[in-house]
Amino acid sequence: MTTSDQTAPSFAVHIPDAELEPEPLDPAQIVSGDPVVTGKVLWESADGTQLRGIWQITPGVVTDTEANELFVVVNGRATVAVAGGETLRIGPGDACVLREGDRTTWTVHETLRKAYHISL
């Protein structure tokens, strides 16, 4: 279910079992391994500046430039090194906030699935 209609009904999704769609990585982002990314936007604001969804990545090492994001890890484990900042060790039940523009390196140890809210 993806909706941007503010009058759409409330809904629930069982995150561990949700079917996700391929989200190909830019090969320039892959540092090592053969990580595969899948995801699904569950809700988008009418103006496109707010997104809520589910995202998953298989083991490997990738780089990214982040949006303003809050997420909660549902399963899996990763180490997220923020350039010029902290190294975050995340796993099931952890909430994480990434700032817009953070340059990160994700080392995914076990397939990681998260539920997220992004502000663009």
Image (spheres, grey):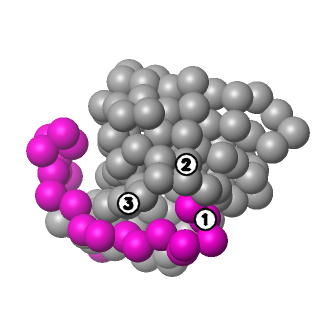
Measured as percent of width and height from the top left, residue 105 is found at 66, 47
Secondary structure under the numbered disc 1 in the rendered image: helix
Q: CA distance from mark 2 to mark 1?
A: 9 Å
Q: Is residue 41 left or right of residue 89?
A: left
Q: Residues within 10 Å of mark 3 (few under 14, many from 20)?
A: some
Bounds of the magenta segment: 5-30
Q: Residue at x 36, y 59 (%)?
A: 36
Look at mark 1 in the image and give the residue it sits on: 29
* Dot 2 or dot 1, earlier in sequence: 1
* Dot 2 or dot 3, earlier in sequence: 3
Q: Is residue 117 visible?
A: no
Q: Residue at x 62, y 37 (%)?
A: 80
**Identity, as a three-letter code, of the amino acid under mark 3:** Val
* Dot 1 or dot 3, earlier in sequence: 1
Look at mark 2 in the image and give the residue it sits on: 61
- Return the mark for residue 37: 3
